[in-house]
Image (tube, grey):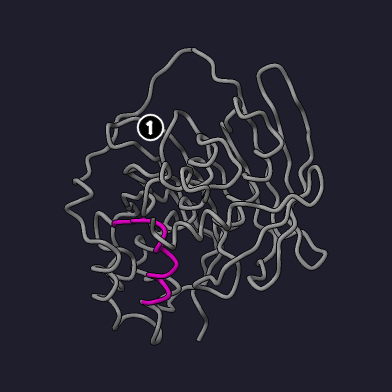
Amino acid sequence: MNDALWSLLELLDLERIEQDIFRGQSRDAIVPRVFGGQVAAQALVAAGRTVPADRPPHSLHAYFLRPGDPGAPIVYTVDRIRDGRSFTTRRVVAVQHGQPIFHLSASFQVPEEGLEHQEPMPPAPDPLTLPTAAELLPRYADWFIGPGVTERLLEARAAVDLRYVDAPPYGSVGEAREPRSQVWFRTNGTLDDAVAAGGAPALARPLLDICLVTYVSDMTLLDSVLLAHGRGGWAVGDVVGASLDHAMWFHRPLRADEWLLYDQESPTAQGGRGLGRGRIFTADGQLVVSVIQEGVIRVPRG
């Protein structure tokens, strides 16, 4: 199994220090704060550890309150808001250095039959025809703000095989494009192997897949905001920013170790903030997740 994926699974395997209190660790991020997708995924792990395994999450709503410190543990406290016959609700607060850094509300549901429809999957090329991160990133090393950025980006995404359909923001600096981006992604290794080897967190398999997709969902969602203005992002140094809030709806079963298409767009940016919307589809066209995120995106002065 890929060592980076094993490390990510260990990151999601929170320590239980009380009935509804958990402790998580961090790893070095590509910016000097905890990666938002990590905090969101760990908070969902904490919530899921207090819910019966037959109730997968169907939605989460979260706010990033303060930058996380990668060098300190994060304590997650779960409030059991409601346990109903069909729905279960949990609230999670992540704390570091005595202050809340993140707040999440998540709802879980017993699977039911009901009305069903979905938007069609947009066209996209076969992911295996697209360059890997190791093939793509070195092409743009001259654009990056300093030495080592390429290696840091590769390390940050080593657990996930993520492939851009078109050039990423740092590949078209100065060229405004349609505010739309697509990436294919899957874990770099099968989760069945991790479970068999005893390396997966203490989670039922559907919840583990959802937590991993939550982790990845924060990696590229604001790319479309940057594309609309020809900005390359933090790696180029022409914007500074951070996630403000994050919402996800989980519609259908998914597997994080099989190819998923993340179709993303930005309907608006204003007031130092940009909005990103995303839809995640399986390779056979099922809409499995919807995502919305707003982030701070500022142009550096001077």
Image quadrant where one finds the N terminus: bottom left
- Secondary structure at badge 1 equals strand
Name the residue at 56% across, 35% down: 204
In the rendered image, is residue 271 in sight? no
Residue 291's place in the image compared with 70, above or below, is: above
Q: Dividing the picture into quarters, in which one does residue 247 lie?
A: top right
Q: Tell which residue pokes out farthest to the top in this image.
A: 114
Q: Position of residue 197 (x, y in %)?
A: 47, 48
Q: Looking at the image, which is closer to me, 54 or 272?
A: 54
Q: Residues within 10 Å of mark 1 (few under 14, many from 20)?
A: many
The residue positioned 68% from the left and 41% from the top of the image is: 47
Would residue 54 be seen by someone viewing this image from the given angle?
yes
Residue at the extreme left of the image, as rendered? 129
Q: Is residue 214 magenta?
A: no
Q: Position of residue 254 (x, y in %)?
A: 42, 34
The kind of residue on which mark 1 rests is Leu
In the picture, residue 231 is in which quadrant?
A: bottom left
152 inside magenta stretch: yes
Q: Is residue 241 left or right of residue 23?
A: left
Where residue 34 appears, x then y in whole percent? 60, 66
Residue pictured at 46% horizontal, 38% vertical: 290
In the drawing, does residue 35 fall left or right of residue 90?
left
Q: Which residue is mark 1?
A: 287
Residue 136 vs residue 235, the one in the foreground? 136
Q: x and y percent of residue 229 in the render?
A: 37, 65
Relative to residue 243, is residue 184 depicted above or below?
above
Residue found at x 52% / y 51%: 199
Q: What span is colored magenta in the figure?
A: 151-163
Placement of 49 over or under 165, stated as above or below = above
Q: Is residue 28 left or right of residue 97?
A: left
Q: How many marks?
A: 1
